[in-house]
Image: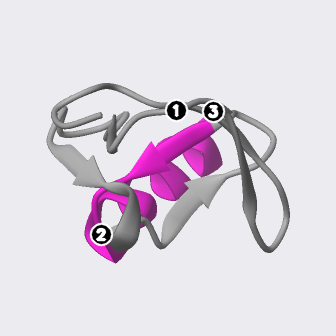
Amino acid sequence: MKNKLAKIKYLPNNYEIIEPGDHVICAISNKKIMLENLNYWNVDLQEAYFSFKEAQLKREKLKDK
């Protein structure tokens, strides 16, 4: 499954792979996130983030609404 987008269900402390793959895409930067490096996501929005920086940007956007 090299270079295949995975479909993920994000859970509070884990995630469930719905469709196998090796990466997901950051909702903010559109960077590829290899599943072994996936550490940041939003359960309510079902979005992945490349790093703390992108996760914080999303949090600030939501707070401003």
Q: Tell me: 28 left or right of 8.
A: left
Q: Residue at x 50, y 66 (%)?
A: 40
Regarding mark 2 in the picture, which secondary structure is present there?
loop
> Along the polypeptide, which appears first: circle 2 or circle 3?
2
Crowding at dot 1, Cα within 10 Å, few <14 / some 14-19 / many 20+, comes out as few
Q: Which residue is mark 1?
A: 20
Q: Disc 3 and disc 1: Cα gap in Å?
A: 35 Å
Q: Which residue is mark 2?
A: 51
- Establish if 61 lies above or below 11: above
Please report the bounds of the magenta region as a residue range.
Answer: 47-65
Residue 21, position as x, y percentages in the image:
40, 34
Q: Tell me: 22 left or right of 32.
A: right
Crowding at dot 2, Cα within 10 Å, few <14 / some 14-19 / many 20+, comes out as some
Q: Which residue is mark 3?
A: 65
Q: Nearer the viewer, residue 38 or 54?
A: 38
Regarding mark 1 in the picture, which secondary structure is present there?
loop
Give the foreground label among 2 and 1: 1
Q: Residue at x 62, y 50 (%)?
A: 63
